[in-house]
Image (cartoon, helix red, strand yellow):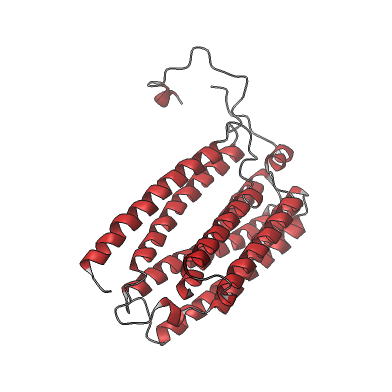
Amino acid sequence: LPSLAIHHQPEKHPDRSIPDPHQDTFSKNVLGFWMYLMTDCLLFGALFCTYAVLHNGTFGGPTSRDIFDLNIAFVETMILLLSSVTCGLAMLSAVKRRTNAVKAWLAVTFLLGALFVAIELTEFSMLVQEGNSWKRSAFLSAFFTLVGTHGLHVSAGLLWILVMIGQFFYWGLTVDTFRRLTIFSMFWHFLDLIWIFIFTFVYLMGVI
Amino acid sequence: MSGNHELNLNETLNEWHGSLKSYLIGFILSLLLTIASFGLVITRLLQGPALVVTIVGLALTQAIVQVLFFLHLGKEAKPKWESVTLYSTVATLLIIVIGTLWIMYDLNNRVMPGM
């Protein structure tokens, strides 16, 4: 990159005893996507803070104790955890070059993810029908924003799975499809990680 | 510059660090930690601040478990840029979270007393 090299003084005696492995497209993409996930962490961190601050601003409306159902939250948690594992099984099948197993595990992951989104949407629509939408209070605005942002991420992931299955049908296992699958698996595991904090800070602490 | 060395499929597959064992360990630990969290809250074995501290601890433990066994952090070759990025993100997160809770919670209480 000569345009960048103008301002860069190369080291006189660079240490080449440890070669930097991040030279190929795979490593660069994985690292770059990891950095995106880290910025997404900051986004969710800000939303969690907003929720924590506004949690008691119920404005005469329902509190978290009145509206949260731990059974639903537990089922959602289990579904997302299972889908994280099936996503990992898709990766393991890819490493063993079993393309059909990759498609099958991706399909299972999709079904579990779709079930998760369906349960979440049912929960949201029940709240809205009872008059407890995001317009009701600051607490509910923060709740819908935080949990809804996570749900949007999962929905984007669902679309991504469909594209991945299509690519595996069309191209099979190649350097490119494997790289995309790897990055998708990072995204999916990351969403499961964020959910840990949602079920703890929103649902469990909401009923204590 | 040392140039771009592109990997073939075999080399790319070897770049990935997951294994069935790590997924099984991650899954079982996550399952146990989740059941412990929900169980403690439903049965009320603990009360008040002790309960809150315990489930937050369980959540942080599960987050670390998933980062290690699902996202395979720390398995990449040196220099470990992913770990470095994570540490700087955690530092930024702590500043955001602690700063927000400290300042905004205090402001909120002063501006809207009794809410």
Residue A53 appears left or right of A153: left
Taking the image as shown, residue A104 lies to the left or right of residue A25, namely right
Residue A109 at x, y percent in the picture: 65, 65
- The mark tally for this picture is 0
Viewer-proximal residue among A52 and A45? A52
Q: Residue furthest left?
A: B111
Farthest residue toward the bottom?
A: A130
Instruction: Name the residue at 61% across, 63% down.
Output: A162
Q: Is residue A196 visible?
A: no
Residue A10, x across and y down, in percent: 46, 17
Depicted A45 relative to depicted A128: above or below: above
Residue A6, horizontal then vertical, whole percent: 39, 20
Q: Residue at x 34, y 52 (%)?
A: B99
* Image position of B115 with respect to B8: above or below: below
Q: Residue at x 78, y 54 (%)?
A: A98
Q: Nearer the viewer, residue A196 or A41?
A: A196
Q: Residue at left 57%, top 60%?
A: B58
The vertical placement of A37 against B78, above or below, is below
Q: Is residue A67 left or right of residue A177?
A: left
Looking at this view, name the residue that lies furthest to the top. A12
In the image, A33 versus A77, the foreground residue is A77
Report whether residue A2 is seen.
yes
Q: Percent x, y for residue B102?
A: 32, 55
